[in-house]
Amino acid sequence: MQKETTRKCIASSVVAEKEQMLRFVVLPDGTVVPDFKKKLPGKGVYVCNAKSLLQKAVNANLFAKALKVKTKVSEELVAQVESILHKQALDAISLARKAGCLVCGMDKVADALKKNNVEFLLEASDAGEDGHKKIMAAAKNLEVFSLFKTEELDKELARDNTVHLAFLKGGDMAKAVRKTFVALTSFLNN
């Protein structure tokens, strides 16, 4: 018997792959909590990975309607989910560095781009205009994410002035990091 891999969003009624959705469960006291690792007991309810849809689910108490039980939803649930996705993406950057598939700094990134060894790029959201233009010209058709400020990247990587990062081809690490970036981007932009 094949496992079902799709779920229906309680806010939009869209049916999508459950891996692309946010899962929530209700604790015994009725509190709704995120369960992104899908490990908590209880029936899960799903919301498409979009901040606006999660806000709609919170505002209209759609968790209680979907589960047919009384629920308590924190006013901070949307911010909590954003914080979790943000932390997962930052943690993935550290893992990529430890795995050796990350290079930092304009010169090293430009060198990796010349060697056609880059899966995708990350640029600090507060990057200077001149550096941004240079990296975009060198990146050509590569995907470039801009999710974190320089200060956040500096802290995560224990470096100074971390503005440009390249995730190298080969292995599954870059794909795993990209997945966390796409999840955060999707949540913030929808």
Image: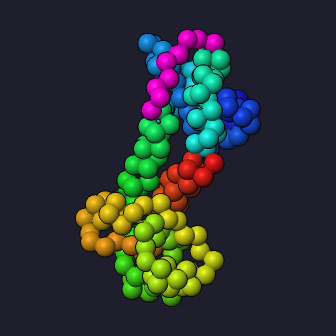
Q: Looking at the image, how many numbered discs can be counted on the residues?
A: 0
Residue in the picture at 57% in, 28% down: 58
Residue 13 part of the magenta segment: no
Q: At 58% from the left edge and 70% from the top edge, which residue is drawn?
A: 143
Q: Residue furthest right?
A: 14
Can residue 172 be seen here? The reply is: no
State the residue at coordinates (68%, 31%). Answer: 11
Residues in magenta? 68-76
Q: Main secondary structure of the magenta part?
A: loop
Seen from the viewer's position, the closer of residues 141 and 136 is 136
Residue shown at the point (39%, 73%) measured from the top left: 163
Look at the image and say whether residue 70 sits in the magenta stretch: yes
- Please indicate whether residue 129 sits to the left or right of residue 53 in the image: left
Q: How is the image coloured?
A: rainbow
**Up-down: is 4 above or below 101?**
above
- Residue nearest the observer in this picture, 96 or 66: 66
28 vs 59, left or right, is left
Q: Residue 176: give x, y in percent of width and height.
A: 50, 56
Q: Position of residue 188 (x, y in %)?
A: 55, 50
Indicate whether 175 appears above or below 134.
above
Quarter holding the N terminus? top right
User: Viewer-proximal residue, 174 or 120?
Assistant: 120
Q: Is residue 6 visible?
A: yes
Is 103 placed above or below 190 here?
below
Q: Is residue 82 left or right of residue 44?
A: left
x then y, percent, for residue 86: 44, 50
Q: Is residue 12 above or below residue 26?
A: below
